[in-house]
Amino acid sequence: MNHKRLTPHSADGFTRALLLAIIVLGLVSTLGGWAIMGMRHVLSPVLRGMFGTCTVVLLGLFVVAWRRLLPARTIGLGCLLFAVSVCALCMVLRLYFPVYGAALDLQPLYLWIPVLYVFAFTLTGHKTSLGISLAVMSLFALISLPYLVRDIDGPYANFTLQLHTVSAVLVAALYFFSSYQRRLHLAELTVGELAELSNTDELTKLCNRRRMATLIDIELEHRRERGTHFAVVLFDIDHFKKVNDKFGHSAGDEALIELATRARQVFRGMDTVARWGGDEFVALVRNVDLAEALHIADALCRHVAAKPMDGGHGMTISCGTVMAQDGDNVDSVLQRADAALYAAKRAGRNRAEGVPLVS
């Protein structure tokens, strides 16, 4: 099955676009707040400095993201740390230095802090995100703890306690959801890998016997329903036992891998090749007649024989080619292909032989 996936490039582009939008929103909010407080004449020197610093940092982050000077994840972490620093500074000013932070309203700020935890869980793996979120939550708790101990009935005490409670529940929920998503993703990968392993020959990475038998059965069904034509080519390495005896089984494995590679090159883009068992391979050739199938099989023989293997010794193959016919099943097709293969062996090897259709 083919699934459409975001490529790393497109995913990175989407992340950068999202970061740019967040940074622009931050700039608009910063400049808007600066202007509104200025018109109300409630800006302290500290707040002016904070707004100015925020503007400079956000502009810098925008340039870095726009010019792709750093990876998107690094920029995202930078945005998160900057937002946490601003929120922490606002809490400190309002709770402990009201002379400088009297114009700040903590309640709207507290409503935005949970968004930081959501943002954190979009940046990294679920365990790292949990660590970042717990560190941020601990920072806010430590900032507010002296205030709560000193003035539990203060104007911001109840809302601060609610913030910490909501933060703890939100982080736990985000971690649970992230863990579930990760387990689901791993389960999907495992199912896909198992399916691939069950249909793939471990040595050559071609289809295995099970998969090829299924494909031939499907093509036979198509032939019965639609009248389509296809050929089966059964081929193996000439004198393969001598290769194993003379050069060792590792050389035999290398010969099988090399034959699989060369078969892919001949059948590329048009057919399916499988390792049937031992040194036998099967190719499924669709929409051809016997003459065309024999021509392709002969091309495979020439391609294999044309170039020695990496060890310097040559290799040839023999092919048996048959057309599917009425009343065939997988076994009958392969039996006739096997007969054609042995005809090629008797005729001198390094050749392709076919069995004509039975009328």
Image (cartoon, rainbow, N blue to C red):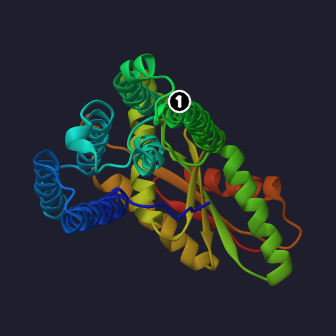
Residue ID at (79%, 83%): 227
Q: Is residue 36 left or right of residue 276?
A: left
Q: Residues within 10 Å of mark 1 (few under 14, many from 20)?
A: some
In depth, the one of 87 and 119 nearer the eye is: 87
Q: Position of residue 199 (x, y in %)?
A: 64, 45
In depth, the one of 140 and 343 nearer the eye is: 140
Residue ID at (36%, 63%): 14
Q: Position of residue 236 (x, y in %)?
A: 54, 46
Q: Is residue 295 left or right of residue 190?
A: left
Q: Is residue 4 left or right of residue 284?
A: left
Q: Position of residue 357 (x, y in %)?
A: 76, 74
Q: Which residue is mark 1?
A: 161
Q: Quadrant of residue 189?
A: top right
User: Where, quadrant-wise, is the C terminus in this rendering?
Assistant: bottom right
> Which amino acid type is marked by label 1?
Leu
> In this picture, is 148 found above or below 76?
above
Q: Residue furthest right?
A: 327
User: Where, quadrant-wise, is the N terminus in this rendering?
Assistant: bottom right
Query: Could you say whether the residue bearing mark 1 is in a helix, strand or loop?
Result: helix
- Inspect this view and state whether residue 348 appears: no
Residue ID at (42%, 47%): 119
> In this picture, is 196 found above or below 351?
above
Q: How many marks?
A: 1
Q: Quadrant of residue 258?
A: top left
- Inspect this view and state whether residue 341 appears: yes
In depth, the one of 25 and 275 nearer the eye is: 25
Q: Quadrant of residue 337?
A: bottom right
Residue ID at (17%, 54%): 51
Q: Residue furthest bottom?
A: 227
In depth, the one of 107 and 55 nearer the eye is: 107
Q: Position of residue 207 (x, y in %)?
A: 59, 49
